[in-house]
Image (cartoon, rainbow, N blue to C red):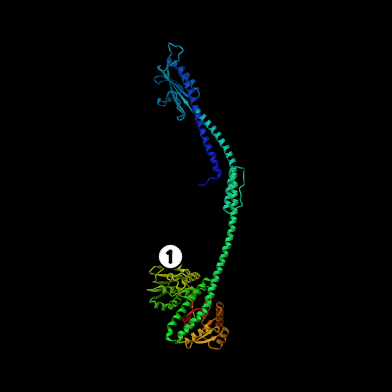
């Protein structure tokens, strides 16, 4: 329903009572006029009837019908009289202006001469009895009476109220015309008086609506000095105050935004500085930790005194824990500092998952856990280094926190996606902790913050890596029964590799070219390679390696240990590409880095090139060398 406007409401408020009053007054006047006209007609017709009755008394008595006929003609000439008739006491017609058969039956005749009112028919009959007149014998001046006299006959008069109704209708029309004319002038007066009110209210509405849209310069034009003018002045004052307040709020918002932006920039700068600090600290600590690990590994190979074996084993375990903590800090600092470059490439699921599962086989057997896999052979589109880091943390946590039962790693293939799931029969994760476990430094089973149990960054690294890759990560757990972590990855087409080289049966025929400046870390790597019965050739830099490759036989593997971090890795890749183009031999290579570097890209048909970051364990180095020498596929580091 459409809402009425201000003008319509004012007109209804003003004219509604006026119309009601006009209708009531006009109705009362018309009714009064009708009653007065009806009474006037009644008196006149009653007088005519009495006169006719008095004149017809003698003629009825003597039977002079001719004189009665003349009286009838005289009665018919009276206004509102249509017909008349004289009847005797037996109801016989003595004189009539109408034929006898057109006279009404007694039931349709009103007895006496009382007006029937406006609710009856327009034409109706009245009957007036005619009686003999008596005079008082004792008083000649007494009034004439004929109430008790015997009837001589009766007078019938047919009267019409048409003229009365016509007169009443004319009066009603005149009263209606006067009322309509009066209401018309009332409307004009109401419109004239409401124009200023409506204009002021319209301006007030426009200003209020403008304030809602932010237009604070609109004002109401003041008119007069009445209450509306005061209201308009109040609205103008309110608009000015709102505008001033909005300006102040805008200035405060700008100031607060600038402050928040400055604080955000400072927080981002602090976060980047913290990440750089962790990366630098990890880099500075990795060097002695790596050297210490290599020295301990060398001591374990040497024949030391049996009395020192327990201390040496404890030292090796401590150094391993230190290297693991430094590796975790390095991974988190690289993710938090956003220095990683994601390079999605095809990865074979069975190989990538099997590599990580194999590295935990010994730890699972030591805890008497059943470590199993159920892998669907498919190719995944992901960054191999980040996927390797995710799997290391998920499977490592499952093995570490499961006391009995086992760990199951599956890869389920769908139409366009595959899902890697890690199931365990551990203690489970309560519902209130299923979000907080992905936060930094959260360990449900390490309230005492024992450093040997880790730093609580594993799942934080998993979530940051999954978000960086765009792979959805989900968790389902039941307390006392176990947990399931699921990672969803897109499928891709498999890549074709060169024909596999024949696997060498021994290391005595395999030569490794070690490229890097003389330092304790390089010396320890060379000592480890020699201890593993590899033929080791040394070059201080890539220029010296060019000369050696040109003069000697092509090596089976190249290990580059360059100290420049990401710059050194880029230089090593460029050098490997150049050697492959010039010599026609695309050699497998292992690049050892001392700082945060992005993942290596892969080119179809290219020899395997793996990245190994410090700190690392000698077993990790030997495993990567074995894969590079025996398998043509490019594996994630």
Q: Would residue 236 appear left or right of 131 to someone viewing this image?
A: right
Q: Identify whether 622 is placed above or below 73.
A: below
Q: What residue would you read off at disc 1?
A: 432
Visible residue check, residue 338: no
Q: Position of residue 313 (x, y in %)?
A: 44, 81
Q: Where is residue 326 in the image (x, y as percent from the top left)?
A: 49, 76
Q: Nearer the viewer, residue 239 or 572?
A: 239
Visible residue check, residue 450: yes
Q: Nearer the viewer, residue 500 or 71?
A: 500
Q: Residue at x 59, y 57 (%)?
A: 250
Q: Where is residue 206 in the image (x, y as percent from the top left)?
A: 58, 49
Q: Would residue 487 appear left or right of 197 to someone viewing this image?
A: left
Q: Residue at x 59, y 51 (%)?
A: 239
Q: Which residue is drawn at 51% across and 36% down?
A: 20
Q: Badge 1, how many Cα within 10 Å: few under 14, some, many 20+?
A: few
Q: Where is residue 199 in the image (x, y as percent from the top left)?
A: 59, 45
Q: Identify whether 307 is placed above or below 400.
A: below
Q: Please tell me whether mark 1 sits on a helix, a strand or a loop.
A: helix
């Amino acid at each position: 329903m459409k809402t009425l406007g201000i003008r319509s409401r004012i007109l209804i408020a003003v004219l509604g009572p006026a119309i009601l009053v006009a209708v009531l007054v006009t109705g009362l006047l018309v009714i009064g006029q009708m009653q007065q006209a009806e009474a006037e007609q009644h008196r006149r017709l009653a007088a005519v009837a009495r006169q006719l009755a008095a004149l017809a008394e003698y003629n009825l008595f003597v039977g002079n019908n001719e004189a009665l006929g003349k009286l009838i003609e005289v009665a018919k000439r009276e206004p509102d009289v249509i017909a008349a008739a004289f009847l005797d006491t037996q109801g016989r017609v003595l004189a009539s202006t109408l034929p006898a058969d057109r006279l009404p039956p007694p039931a349709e005749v009103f007895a006496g001469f009382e007006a029937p009112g406006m609710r009856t028919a327009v034409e109706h009959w009245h009957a007036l009895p005619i009686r003999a007149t008596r005079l008082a014998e004792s008083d000649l001046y007494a009034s004439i009476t004929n109430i008790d006299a015997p009837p001589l006959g009766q007078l019938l008069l047919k009267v019409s109220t048409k003229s009365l109704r016509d007169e009443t209708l004319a009066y009603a029309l005149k009263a209606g015309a006067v009322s309509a004319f009066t209401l018309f002038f009332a409307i004009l007066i109401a419109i004239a008086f409401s124009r200023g009110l409506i204009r002021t209210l319209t301006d007030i509405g426009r200003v209020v609506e403008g304030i809602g849209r932010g237009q604070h310069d609109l004002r109401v034009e003041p008119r007069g000095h009445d209450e509306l003018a005061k209201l308009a002045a109040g609205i103008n004052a309110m608009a000015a105050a709102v505008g001033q307040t909005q300006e102040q709020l805008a200035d405060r918002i700008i100031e607060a935004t600038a402050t928040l932006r400055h604080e955000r920039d400072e927080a981002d700068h602090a976060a980047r500085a913290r990440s750089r600090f962790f990366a630098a600290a990890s880099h500075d600590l990795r060097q002695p930790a790596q050297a210490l690990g290599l020295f301990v590994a060398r001591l374990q190979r040497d024949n030391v005194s049996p009395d020192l074996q327990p201390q040496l084993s404890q030292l090796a375990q401590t150094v391993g824990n230190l290297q693991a903590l430094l590796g975790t800090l390095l991974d988190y600092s690289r993710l938090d500092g956003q220095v990683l470059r994601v390079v999605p490439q095809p990865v074979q699921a069975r190989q990538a998952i099997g590599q990580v599962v194999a590295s935990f086989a010994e730890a699972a057997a030591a805890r008497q856990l059943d470590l199993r896999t159920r892998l669907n052979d498919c190719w995944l589109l992901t960054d191999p280094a980040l996927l390797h880091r995710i799997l290391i943390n998920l499977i490592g946590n499952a093995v570490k926190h499961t006391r009995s039962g086992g760990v199951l790693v599956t890869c389920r293939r769908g139409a366009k996606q595959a899902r890697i799931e890690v199931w365990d029969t551990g203690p489970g994760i309560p519902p209130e902790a299923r979000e907080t476990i992905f936060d930094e430094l959260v360990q449900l089973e390490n309230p005492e913050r024992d450093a040997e149990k880790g730093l609580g960054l594993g799942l934080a690294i998993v979530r940051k890596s999954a978000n960086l890759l765009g792979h959805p990560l989900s968790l389902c757990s039941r307390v006392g029964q176990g947990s399931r972590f699921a990672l969803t990855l897109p499928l891709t087409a498999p890549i074709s590799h060169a024909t596999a080289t024949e696997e060498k049966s021994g290391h005595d025929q395999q030569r490794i070219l070690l490229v890097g400046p003389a330092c304790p870390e390089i010396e320890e790597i060379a000592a480890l390679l020699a201890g593993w019965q590899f033929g080791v050739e040394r070059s201080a830099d890539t220029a010296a390696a060019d000369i050696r490759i040109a003069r000697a036989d092509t090596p089976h593997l190249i290990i580059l240990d360059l100290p420049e971090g990401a710059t050194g890795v880029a230089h090593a890749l460029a050098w490997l590409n150049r050697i492959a183009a010039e010599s026609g031999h695309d050699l497998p290579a292992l690049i050892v880095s001392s700082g945060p570097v992005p993942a290596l890209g892969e080119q179809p048909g290219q020899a395997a090139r793996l990245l190994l970051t410090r700190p690392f364990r000698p077993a990790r180095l030997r495993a990567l060398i074995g894969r590079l020498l025996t398998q043509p596929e490019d594996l994630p580091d």
